[in-house]
Structure formats: structure tokens, C-alpha cells
Amino acid sequence: MELISDRHPLVVVVGSGGVGKTTLAASMGVLSARAGRDTLVMTFDPSLRLKDALGVGEEAKLQEMPVPLDAPGRLYASLLDARQTFDRLIQRYAQEEEASRRILENRFYQQLSGTLSGILEYMAVERLFEVEAEGRYAQVILDTPPTRQALRRRAPRSAYSGPWRDIVSSFVVHAPGPTNTSSSTSENAVR
């Protein structure tokens, strides 16, 4: 199976903890950029190990950061900050700037936006929607926290529209591990 291709513009890497999801996602990003695609590797794993794997700093929470790589395509890294994504969502849909400000400054919102069950997963899919709408990348690779249900728990409706509609719900790469001992996924990804 060819994991990095124009047929699969979004690849989601999932699996148990410690099986190499972040390493696989970073390697796939490098492979994609070397194939000439502008590529974004994102993570919503709170451990933010992608920061070390691709050599980016905390600024990758604020914006997509270029990763130095001698390749025909460009490689970028992004660390999801669920709170910032939630804030942008409020700003986008609030009818007026004053309404947005009142919501963002509300103590209930401030508490809720960081602790609501499933908020990290919801904001990850919302961020995918933003990235797809911008149309800057030929390939997006999403590194997830340790869980097989990473994107199934709660996804905004917006994630199921546009060219990624079928991909978000069906194309997922399982990192090899104790419950998935096949090494073909990682072997194919780094070739």
C-alpha cells in the first residue's frame, strides 16, 4: 500500500503509547516533502514529542513552522493548541467583535474550553478543517495521542465536508505495536 500519494492527502497515525506514532508521522512527512509535496505534520498529542522529532520550538503552537530540509517540497510542523483553536472558532462564528470578546473573557468559557471532555479531539478535527480550507498543503499527516479512537469520539460537522470527507473517517495508519504486530506499515512509510 502506498501511504504517501496524491490519493491520500490526509494520513492519520494512531496506535497505543510508545509504538512509534510520532517517529512514523515525522518520517512520512520527510518522505512526502522529498517526493515534492508541500507537507504539514501536525500533532494533537499533549506530549508534543513531534516538537523534538522535527526540531521545532514552542512557536509551532502559534503557527505552522518550516522544518529545514533539503527537498523539492516544503515541510512544516504544527503543534495543536486546543485552546487557541477554540478561541479562533469563537472569533470566526461570533456575530460581532464585542460578542467574541465577551465570550473569550468569560470565566466559564475559560474553564470549559480547557477541560470539556473530548475537547482536544474536537479541536484537532476543527484544525484539520482550517488547514484543508486554506489549501496550502498537498499532504497532511496527523500524529495522535495514544488511542485508537483519536478522531472518532467527537468530530465537528465541518470535518466531514470537502475533499477529506471520506478520508477523515476511513484512512488511518495504525502504528505497529503490541496489538498490531505488522511491520509493513512502518516499512512502507520509510521507503
Image (cartoon, rainbow, N blue to C red):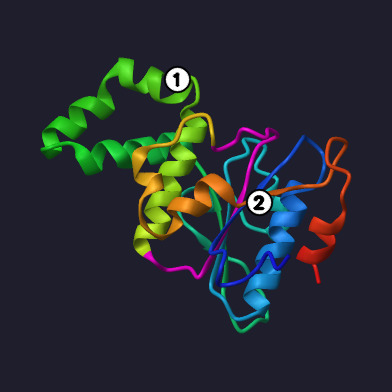
For marks 1 and 2, the one nearer the N-term is 2
Q: Position of residue 152 (x, y in %)?
A: 54, 34
**Residue type for callout 2:** Lys
**CA distance for labels 1 and 2:** 25 Å
User: Eyeballing the image, is 23 above or below 191?
Assistant: above
Q: Which residues are magenta?
A: 135-151
157 up-or-down from 2: above or below: above
Indicate whether residue 79 is drawn in magenta: no
Residue pictured at 54% horizontal, 38% vertical: 151
What residue is shown at x 82% (from left), y 42% (from top)? Answer: 19
- SS for dot 2: helix
> Image check: 33 left or right of 181?
left
In the rendered image, the quadrant that contains the N terminus is bottom right
Instruction: Bin the neighbour count of mark 2 within 10 Å (Cα to Cα): few under 14, some 14-19, many 20 and up.
Output: many
Residue 132, quarter of the rendered image? bottom left
State the mark number for residue 116.
1
Can you say whether 55 is above or below 91 in the image?
below
Amino acid under label 1? Leu
Instruction: Residue at 72% x, 52% y: name it.
Output: 52
- The residue that disc 2 covers is 51
